[in-house]
Image (spheres, grey):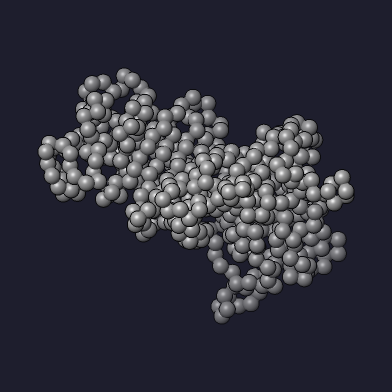
Amino acid sequence: MATAIKGVFLENFRSFSKPTRIELRPITLLYGQNSAGKSSVIKALLLLQQSLAASRRRGEDTRTFVFSGEFVDLGSFEASVSGHNTGKTMAIGVDISESDSNDSRVGAFEVTWSAREDSNVREMTLSVTLRGERLEFERHPQRSSWLLKRESVPAFLKAVIVDKNLFLASEDMVENLRSNVGYLPEFFGERFPTEMNKSLVPPNTRNRWLTSGLSGSYSDRQNDDTQPTFGKSYLADAWDEACRSEWNRCRRQIESMTHIGPLRQEPLRFNGYSPTEGLEVGATGDQMLSLLHEQPNLVVKVNDHLEQMELPYKIKVGSLGSAETVGKVIFLALVNRKTSLQLSPSDVGVGYSQVLPLITQSTLARNKLVCVEQPELHLHPAMQARLGDLFISEAMGGSRTRFLIETHSESLMLRILRRIREGHLQPEDVQVIYIDQEKNGASSIHAIPIDKSGDFTTEWPGGFFDERLEEFGF
């Protein structure tokens, strides 16, 4: 079954101060004026990816997002929250779905993390939509665990208890929750409550025990005999069955995202070889040459795309020098298809250095989201249009690659509209989002539908793409 990130949710993240949900399709294009908020959508996903990676290493504070790291540098919570207002709660979420599933229980699996850092208080809460039920969790104030909020208990039981005959009156934990006597489930996990503890904790663990007239902190009383504990718990097993596979798929999709930034590395005549994991060219394309050296079949696929894009060159990767003294030195050459003349990419301008990482990463990706910023940079309009064919080929082929593209390119859009008109692509495979900035600085989104004739069914806000007509005097 194919899993995909089908949507992004933002609230109080940078210029997205209002709750905003962005639907992602195989090809999603983000347009808008400069500084309208286009890149913020990609940066939000990178922030999730970075925070998950740090949490899995267990070396970072898991009570908030990790704002500076290897994937993105957003500075701090104050720098990232809308209006730099630390009294607001910032939320970022994703919608994961199994598009090929025939199981009626398997639908959208949504996870939204919310963070607050006010008056030196750092808190994180979590909203999960599982089997159509919305569940709210909060981080335990003293332990690395999650607590289910009291108001989510009915939804929790509905989401978990699918087989009504499985949970009879014999399980004390279920009856405790149903009768609402004052205890709540505790879950362990890093960024997600994956494992349910086979015991219940008091609902207010922030200050003191509120049951049985006992005083003292929860950490002092966690082993007290008055705390309900259970042996084998069918409820805990049912939670594991209900959520673990969905969460693992969600986590894999976030962790496997790849990002190509707006400025790719300038061409070098040669470079030192550095072993890679064989999956990503890097945000600047710095790993591309080593990847091509490691994977000769990848060179063949890249050359196929170069030929389809009607480019006169194919690439060749070689090595030189003594690995014993200076390490392995590798180089990339552009070979003219007609004359066999070899050139360095640094001799043919920066256009090739900008497009090669895009082609290589698009070819590498399998069932993952590829985020691209300004793919058209330094490219002729005809080349920009041919990039549309590259994205279509990989998105609609067997690799199930999905693209989230931040761009200003009219040529790229026109090629995609043409392919829809020719029947190579369906309108529902493309999502076009125009991001506008309101007078108060807040970002808002406008989905621009496309019909089967390859035409927009609504006008662009602010006359975007009308500049050409204006220059002609219309």
Residue at the spot 83% in from the left edge and 48% down from the top edge: 470
Query: Where's residue 416, x and y in %?
Result: 75, 42
Camera sees residue 49: no
Residue at the spot 68% in from the left edge and 47% down from the top edge: 31
Occupied quadrant, residue 276: bottom right
Camera sees residue 312: yes
Direction bottom: furthest residue? 325
Query: Where's residue 464, x and y in %?
Result: 74, 46
Q: Is 60 left, or right, of 39 in this rendering?
A: left
- 352 and 184: which is toward the camera: 184
Q: Where, quadrant-wise, is the C terminus in this rendering?
A: top right
Residue at the spot 44% in from the left edge and 56% down from the top edge: 77
Occupied quadrant, residue 132: top left
- 151 and 236: which is toward the camera: 151
Q: Is residue 34 above or below residue 322?
A: above
Q: Is 418 left, or right, of 329 in this rendering?
A: right
Residue at the spot 30% in from the left edge and 22% down from the top edge: 166
Q: How many marks?
A: 0
Query: Where's residue 89, x and y in %?
Result: 43, 47
Q: Is 145 left, or right, of 230 in this rendering?
A: right
Direction top: furthest residue? 165
- 213 and 142: which is toward the camera: 213
Query: Where's residue 316, x and y in %?
Result: 72, 63
Q: Is residue 419 above or below residue 272?
A: above
Direction front: furthest residue? 439
